[in-house]
Amino acid sequence: MADTVAEVMTYHPAAVEADQPVCAAAALMRDHDTGAVIVNENGRIQGIITDRDIAVRVVAAEKSPQTPVREACSPYVEAIDPDTTIDQAVRIMRSHAVRRLPVLEDGRAVGIVSLGDLALERDPHSALADISAAEGNQ
């Protein structure tokens, strides 16, 4: 069983610059089969944008797909380092009600760990683990 998030995280997460349009973030989500993309400014993490952010803050607000990512992303992000224990990551997700945690080294995203990653590790027979392990539906 894994002890740290480095053992279960997704390395090299998809990332977009904050001044790019949300359609670029959506294309990355499609191409990487993910629901979240790291938002960078000059290579350093500035936030995270999710498929829900795009649906609520862009589509439902009737904004253009050319809207800059910085206007749609969640700018405050809880983040952890690769040596964070699985238990610590679970506590952080619970206390901040988040489903994903960027994994940083020197302010740069080196990975991302999701609720699904942790479910696969801790309870591989759970419904969440089953869903997380399933192939994407592109």
Image: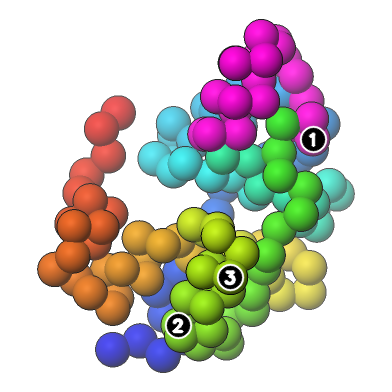
Magenta highlight range = 51-71
**Residue positioned 66% across, 9% down in the render:** 62
Left or right: where 67 falls relative to 101: right
The mark found on residue 95 in the picture is 3
The picture places residue 86, in percent across and down from the top left corner, at 45, 82
- Point out residue 33 in the picture as x, y percentages from the top left corner: 39, 40
Instruction: Give the residue type that dot 3 points to.
Output: Ser
The Cα–Cα distance between marks 1 and 3, rounded to whole angstroms, is: 25 Å
Report x, y in % for residue 106: 78, 74
* Residue found at the far left of this picture: 125
**Place of residue 2 in the rendered image (x, y in percent of width and height, measured from the top left):** 35, 86
Mark 1: few/some/many CA within 10 Å (<14, 14-19, 20+): many
Residue that appears at 74% across and 64% down:
108
119 left or right of 25 in image: left
Q: Which mark is residue 70?
A: 1
Q: Secondary structure at mark 2?
A: helix
- Report the side of 47 relative to 26 (left or right): right
Contact between labelled residues 2 and 3, with CB atoms less than 8 Å apart: no
Q: Which mark is residue 17?
A: none
54 magenta-colored? yes
Helix, strand or loop at mark 1? helix
Q: Amino acid at mark 2?
A: Ile
The CA span between labels 2 and 1 is 30 Å
What mark, if any, has residue 86 been given in the picture? 2
The N terminus - image quarter: bottom left
Q: Give the residue type that dot 1 points to.
A: Arg
Let me know if residue 85 is in the magenta part: no
The answer to which image quadrant residue 7 occupies is: bottom left
